[in-house]
C-alpha cells in the first residue's frame, strides 16, 4: 500500500494536491506537512504535521513513523520571493531537494515527486514553443535552483536508481488556495479584483505572454505522471507541461465578457524583467507522447470556472 508524504502541503499546489491524492489513496495514506499550521481545507480529513523540511531528523522521523513510500516535495521559495532573498531561496530550494533525494535512497522510497518550473528558461532560450531540450541559462535564483535540481534528480536516478519524477509547471491559476509569490500571480489577483472592485492594476505590461495552466489540469497531470508505468518515461529531468498562453490584455478581455465594466491598467515592476526572460509558449509534446498528457482548460473555460468559484467563495 502506498503511503504519501507531502512537504509544503499548505501552499498553492499543496492544498489541492493533498485533497486530490486523499481521494485516490485514502485520507490516512496521505500525510500533509508544512512549516505553518494547517490550511483550513486540510484541518480535517487526514494526518497533518508541522515540519520544517530543513530539519532532516524530524523529516526522517515522520517517514519512519508513518511508513512513507512516496514523497511529494513542494516546499520552495518562488520566483518573485526568491529574488528578494537569493541566498535563502538557494538554501531552501536546494537543501530540501538534496535531503529528500538522500532520504529516498536511504529509506528505499518507491517514488519522489519534485516540481520544476518554466523559470529554468532564460532570455537566450527560444521564447515561442520552447522545446523540452534547448538552451537553458536561467537568470533568477529560482530558475538556477530549479535547473540544478533537475540535474540532481537525474543524477540520483542514474547513480542510485531512485524513481524521481518532475514537470516544469507554467504559471498555475487556482481559486481554492492562495499563490505563494510567483511572477504569474497576477492571473489570479485579476479575477479577485475584477469581482471585488471591477478594476485591476497589473504588475506586468499588457502584451506579456506567459504559459499558464488551470490548477485542476496541473493536479491531474501530476497524479497521472506519478501513476505512469516507469517504462513509459523517457526522462527523469523535468517534462515541459503546457495548457495555454495569454497576455494580461487577453485575460482582461476574457473577464470583460462576464463583467463588461471591468477596467485594467498597467504598472510593471521588477517582475516584468523576470517575465521577459521566460517563454511565451511551451512545446510539451514529450509529455503528450510519453505518458499521454492532455490539458482540459483554455482561457475561456478557466475564466468561467474562476469567476463562478471565486464569486461563491468571496460571497459576492
Ligand atoms: N504555483 C506555481 O505557479 C508554480 C509554477 C512552477 C513551479 N511551482 C513549484 O511547485 C512547488 C509548490 O509551489 P506552490 O505554488 O504551491 O508554492 P507556495 O509558496 O504556495 O507553497 C510552498 C509551501 O512550502 C512551505 N514551506 C516553505 N518553506 C518551508 C520549509 N522550510 N519547510 C516546510 N515547508 C515550507 C510554505 O509554507 C508553503 O506552504 C514549488 O516547488 C514551486 O517552485 C509552482
Image: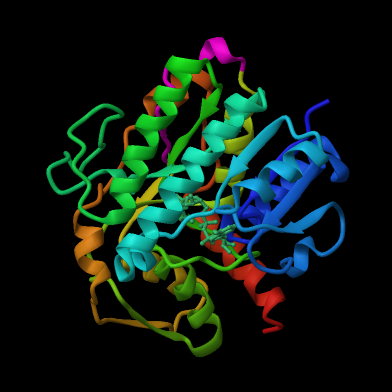
Question: Where, quadrant-wise, is the N terminus in this rendering?
Answer: top right
Q: Where does residue 276 sit, x and y in percent of width and height?
A: 19, 58
Is residue 128 one of those drawn in magenta?
no
Instruction: Judge whether residue 41 can be spotted in this image.
Output: yes
314 to the left or right of 260: right
**Measuring 68% from the left and 32% from the top, which residue is drawn there?**
70
* Residue that lies at the very extreme toward the top in this rendered image: 231
**Measuring 62% from the left and 26% from the top, which residue is drawn there?**
106
* Residue that lies at the very extreme toward the front in this rendered image: 57
Is residue 230 one of those drawn in magenta?
yes
Q: Where does residue 130 sit, x and y in percent of width and height?
A: 25, 36
Q: Where does residue 6 sit, x and y in percent of width and height?
A: 67, 46
Q: Where does residue 294 sit, x and y in percent of width and height?
A: 52, 32
Name the foreground residue: 240 vs 93: 93
Q: Main secondary structure of the magenta part?
A: loop
24 to the left or right of 78: right
Quarter residue 67 falls in: top right
Name the foreground residue: 169 vs 189: 169
Range shown magenta = 229-242
**Measuring 61% from the left and 48% from the top, which residue is drawn there?**
216
Which color mode does the image show? rainbow
Quarter residue 51 falls in: bottom right
Image height of 124 relative to 77, above or below: above
Question: Where, quadrant-wise, is the C terminus in this rendering?
Answer: bottom right
**Measuring 53% from the left and 33% from the top, which residue is drawn there?**
101
85 to the left or right of 310: left
155 to the left or right of 46: left
Image height of 64 relative to 27, above or below: above
Quarter residue 225 falls in: top right
Amino acid at each position: 500500500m502506498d503511503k504519501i508524504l507531502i512537504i509544503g502541503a499548505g501552499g498553492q499546489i499543496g492544498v489541492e494536491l493533498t485533497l486530490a491524492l486523499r481521494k485516490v489513496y485514502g485520507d490516512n495514506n496521505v500525510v500533509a506537512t508544512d512549516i505553518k499550521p494547517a490550511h483550513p481545507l486540510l484541518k480535517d480529513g487526514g494526518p497533518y504535521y508541522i515540519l520544517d523540511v530543513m530539519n532532516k531528523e524530524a523529516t526522517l522521523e515522520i517517514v519512519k513513523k508513518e511508513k512513507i513510500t512516496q514523497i511529494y516535495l513542494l516546499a520552495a521559495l518562488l520566483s518573485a520571493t526568491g529574488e528578494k532573498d537569493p541566498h535563502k531561496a538557494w538554501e531552501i530550494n536546494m537543501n530540501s531537494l538534496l535531503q529528500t533525494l538522500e532520504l529516498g535512497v536511504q529509506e528505499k522510497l518507491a517514488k519522489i515527486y519534485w516540481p520544476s518550473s518554466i523559470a529554468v528558461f532564460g532570455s537566450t532560450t527560444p521564447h515561442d514553443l520552447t522545446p523540452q531540450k534547448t538552451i537553458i541559462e536561467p537568470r533568477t535564483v529560482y530558475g538556477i535552483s530549479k535547473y540544478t535540481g533537475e540535474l540532481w534528480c537525474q543524477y540520483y536516478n542514474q547513480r542510485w536508481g531512485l524513481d524521481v519524477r518532475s514537470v516544469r509547471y507554467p504559471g498555475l491559476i487556482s481559486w481554492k488556495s492562495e499563490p505563494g509569490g510567483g511572477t504569474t500571480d497576477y492571473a489570479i489577483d485579476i479575477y479577485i479584483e475584477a469581482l471585488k472592485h471591477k478594476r485591476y492594476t497589473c504588475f506586468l505590461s499588457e502584451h506579456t505572454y506567459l504559459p499558464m495552466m488551470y490548477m485542476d489540469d496541473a493536479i491531474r497531470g501530476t497524479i497521472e505522471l506519478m501513476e505512469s508505468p516507469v517504462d513509459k518515461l523517457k526522462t527523469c529531468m523535468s517534462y515541459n507541461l503546457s495548457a495555454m498562453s495569454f497576455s494580461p490584455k487577453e485575460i482582461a478581455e476574457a473577464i470583460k465578457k462576464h463583467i463588461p465594466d471591468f477596467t485594467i491598467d498597467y504598472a510593471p515592476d521588477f517582475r516584468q524583467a523576470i517575465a521577459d526572460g521566460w517563454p511565451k509558449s511551451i512545446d510539451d509534446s514529450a509529455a503528450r507522447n510519453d505518458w499521454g498528457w492532455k490539458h482540459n482548460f483554455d482561457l475561456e473555460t478557466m475564466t468561467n470556472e474562476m469567476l463562478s468559484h471565486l464569486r461563491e467563495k468571496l460571497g459576492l
